[in-house]
Image (cartoon, coloured by chain):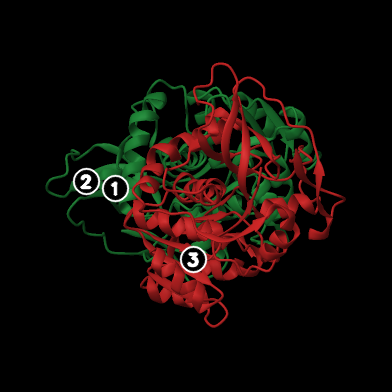
Chain colours: A green, B red
Amino acid sequence: MKAIVVNQPGGAEQLHVKDATIPSIKPGELLIKVKAFAINRTDIVSREGKSGYMSNPILGIEVAGEVVEAAEGTTIEIGTRVMGLVNGGGYAEYAVMPADRAMKVPAHLSFEEAAAIPEVFLTAYQTLFWLGNLSPQETVLIHAGGSGVGTAAIQLVKQMTDAKIITTAGSQEKLDFCKTLGADIGINYKEQSFDEEVLIATNSQGADVILDFIGASYWKQNLKSLKMDGRWVLIGVLGGAMVENINIRELMEKRAQIKGTLLTPRSDQYKKELTEEFMSKVMPLFDQQKIRPIVDTVFPFEEIQEAHRHMEASKNIGKIVVRVLN
Amino acid sequence: MKAIVVNQPGGAEQLHVKDATIPSIKPGELLIKVKAFAINRTDIVSREGKSGYMSNPILGIEVAGEVVEAAEGTTIEIGTRVMGLVNGGGYAEYAVMPADRAMKVPAHLSFEEAAAIPEVFLTAYQTLFWLGNLSPQETVLIHAGGSGVGTAAIQLVKQMTDAKIITTAGSQEKLDFCKTLGADIGINYKEQSFDEEVLIATNSQGADVILDFIGASYWKQNLKSLKMDGRWVLIGVLGGAMVENINIRELMEKRAQIKGTLLTPRSDQYKKELTEEFMSKVMPLFDQQKIRPIVDTVFPFEEIQEAHRHMEASKNIGKIVVRVLN
């Protein structure tokens, strides 16, 4: 089969297609004929050799495709259209998926659309509800509203709670799109101080929950934007990882809860439980077409380098997907 | 009545006794004839004029004494021996206490012992279980094991869970005492690197919960001591408030949860709920004499300056109490 690997740690030019052996499955696993996969920031970190937790030389953590082989005891039939997280190996014609993470693709969605669901919607669900404990009457600040996780989070909040949604993005086009998904207030961080706008929008109270993909460059403003007893979930460091001078007395006085998280390195058991809760609580909303995957661009398999560069340029609204023809 | 107020923001020499009017009670409140009160770090912060949340000019947030007046509708009888948190005004012959925070003093305890209970045991309970979510098979790192909150926390963990207790202190005398209360491992932070010792004691896993009274000076070592998915509760900044250069990628990779908290500025409703849960779950252990207040020194009312200086010297094991003769 064809698969995409990294020549040596570095830029997008290090990605290339090579021949690889079709992987074999173990108990509890499915072999998926991959029809589409999506690109994630964590793939870029792996490509650069900066994370130590990916053991599979083939990149890729989520796929959509057809089940072609199922281990004994699994209950999913051959031929089922599924999507879900994989433990690496997603950038390939075939990939192995633990059966307890396989979600059936709703009939009205294509494989390209389905590939845009698992990572960002599971991440958004986990950060909003498991870590952020977002309650109906609260306010959530979602940074990078046009990103994959941002567009997922806005929809989940809108459809599952009455919470107020404030989002930031770097262009009017992105903010307008976020409003069509359900954002109540959009802030262009290039033109406005988002902390001041958050305080204006919340009667000087601040946001109960912050989804922070940005990190260092937003630190002080996020702290100002956080309400008393607020939960601040760290899920990315697009604006740098090193924060100079944190006053922890302020964290105490605000009774702030800062929660770091990453989804990819978590255990199989955690991903199983998260997927199961997501299937029961969120998948019906996909079936009813109240929530939808947001696909920015679909690239052909051979253009993987362009797909990575497109993500690194941060111009996408929603997910970047790669189609696998086989 | 006699009461202790602050001349002007500053050192212990600013504390003096003056005549004040006996306070009057509102619905839901009790008037307490104060027999003893305890000194807390937050009193020192208030004395220095560094916190903005104390509106009562008389210091003091916890007392033990006798009920001399009760608002209509309250169910506590005149003459009952009670202890509990007050909204300032504890350093006096009479103080007002919301009735839903009044805990009956166990028969075997003196007022001086009872005054040593509310603040530190409620704080330790809140940080260990409400914020730290400490589970039976986990490990907790309790800094300042000889302090009021430290001695309370060690006893609560020992009597209420099977969790392993690691504590730090600055002298062998304090560590020996912590072991009599139930600590499994004692680390002299003046002679050992506590993070290395924590990793040795936990098979390189780290502690699930850290009770951090120290802040800046322990930051890097606390982060090293924290287990994956660990909860790190900030409840004091004895070692400074400003931390330079925090790498938030490390917080994400460890999936750390940092939770700042202070008890005194919290709402009446919160203190009511915390007191109620504490009365049902912990007070029986006091009645059975499995848990006991730890009193370091009892000062007479007139020696309030010495009492504050004694706390500032950090030589106490357990609480510093002031006796009120009236």
Q: Earlier in the sequence, mark 3 or mark 1?
A: 1
* Residue beneath the point at 71% across and 59% down: B308
Secondary structure under badge 2?
A: strand
Q: Residues within 10 Å of mark 3 (few under 14, many from 20)?
A: some
Name above or below for residue B193 compared with residue A298: below
* Residue beneath the point at 75% across and 33% down: A199
Q: Which mark is residue A33?
A: 1
Cβ–Cβ under 8 Å for marks 1 and 2: yes
Chain letter for mark 2, please: A
Name above or below for residue B233 compared with residue A148: below
Residue B293 seen in the current view: yes
Q: Could you tell me residue B21's position as x and y percent?
A: 78, 32
Residue wearing tag 3: A51
Q: Which mark is residue A68?
A: 2
Residue B251 seen in the current view: no
Q: Could you tell me residue A219's position as x and y percent?
A: 70, 52
* Residue beneath the point at 66% across and 44% down: A254
Cβ–Cβ under 8 Å for marks 3 and 1: no
Give the CA separation, mark 3 to mark 1.
27 Å
Q: Could you tell me residue A215's position as x and y percent?
A: 64, 53
Chain letter for mark 3, please: A
Q: Nearer the viewer, residue B65 or A70?
A: B65
